[in-house]
Image (cartoon, helix red, strand yellow):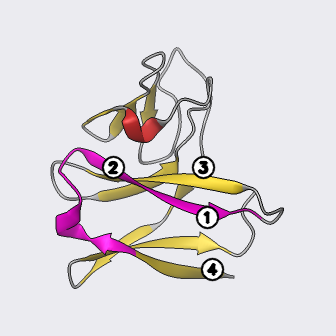
């Protein structure tokens, strides 16, 4: 089961910028989700932790549909969460939608 939560109006997101949504997993641990706005106004959401060393992806540089981790410049796809070769790793992705100018994020009842 899932639920959609309101994040913020689209206009509150800078192009090529991010916001953080905090939620809890099924064990009560806080999880940070980075919600990103691309140049073409598409919105993506991924776990805010780089699969390499846990760097805060929301503080990285967005280009195209990728984010460069601020710690070691790993390039992570905002579409599927996968690291760009030759690096290997993946972070969780979350569904988003924009309705009437407002960004929504889908959260599952149980987050791993």
Q: Secondary structure at mark 4?
A: strand
| Mark 2, other Cα within 10 Å: few <14 / some 14–19 / many ≥20 | many
Quadrant of the rendering where the C terminus is positioned: bottom right
State which quadrant residue 104 falls in.
Answer: bottom left
Q: Which residue is mark 1?
A: 23
Q: Say whether disc 3 or disc 2 marks the residue closer to the N-terminus.
A: 2
Q: Say whether disc 1 or disc 2 marks the residue closer to the N-terminus.
A: 2
Q: Say whether disc 3 or disc 1 marks the residue closer to the N-terminus.
A: 1
Can you give x and y, in whole percent of width and height, for residue 73 in the image? 42, 18
On screen, residue 12 versus residue 6, left or right, reads left
Q: Which residue is mark 3?
A: 92
Q: Secondary structure at mark 1?
A: strand
Q: Is residue 63 magenta?
A: no
Q: Is residue 21 above or below residue 89?
A: below
Q: Say whether disc 4 or disc 1 marks the residue closer to the N-terminus.
A: 4
Can you give x and y, in whole percent of width and height, for residue 46 in the image? 50, 50
Q: Which residue is mark 4?
A: 2
Between marks 2 and 4, how big is the CA–CA gap?
A: 23 Å
Q: Nearer the viewer, mark 4 or mark 1?
A: 1
Q: Are marks 1 and 2 in contact (CB under 8 Å)?
A: no
Q: Nearer the viewer, mark 2 or mark 4?
A: 2
Q: Nearer the viewer, mark 3 or mark 2?
A: 2
From the viewer's side, name the closer residue of 109 and 23: 23
Between marks 3 and 2, how big is the CA–CA gap?
A: 16 Å
Q: Residue at x 44, y 55 (%)?
A: 45
Residue 71 numbered tag: none
Between marks 3 and 1, how big is the CA–CA gap?
A: 14 Å
Between marks 4 and 3, how big is the CA–CA gap?
A: 15 Å
Q: Is residue 23 magenta?
A: yes
Q: Say whether disc 4 or disc 3 marks the residue closer to the N-terminus.
A: 4
Task: Read off the magenta span.
Answer: 7-25
Q: Residue at x 60, y 49 (%)?
A: 92
């Amino acid at each position: 089961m899932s639920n959609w939560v309101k994040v913020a109006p689209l206009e509150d997101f800078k192009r090529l910028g991010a916001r953080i949504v905090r939620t809890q997993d099924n064990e009560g641990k806080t999880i940070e989700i980075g919600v990103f706005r691309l140049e073409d106004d598409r919105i993506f959401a991924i776990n805010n932790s780089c699969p390499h060393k846990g760097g805060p992806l929301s503080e990285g540089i967005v280009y195209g549909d990728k984010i460069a981790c601020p710690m070691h410049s790993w390039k992570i796809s905002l579409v599927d969460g996968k690291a760009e070769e030759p690096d290997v790793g993946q972070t969780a992705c979350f569904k988003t939608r924009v309705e009437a100018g407002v960004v929504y994020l889908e959260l599952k009842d149980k987050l791993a």
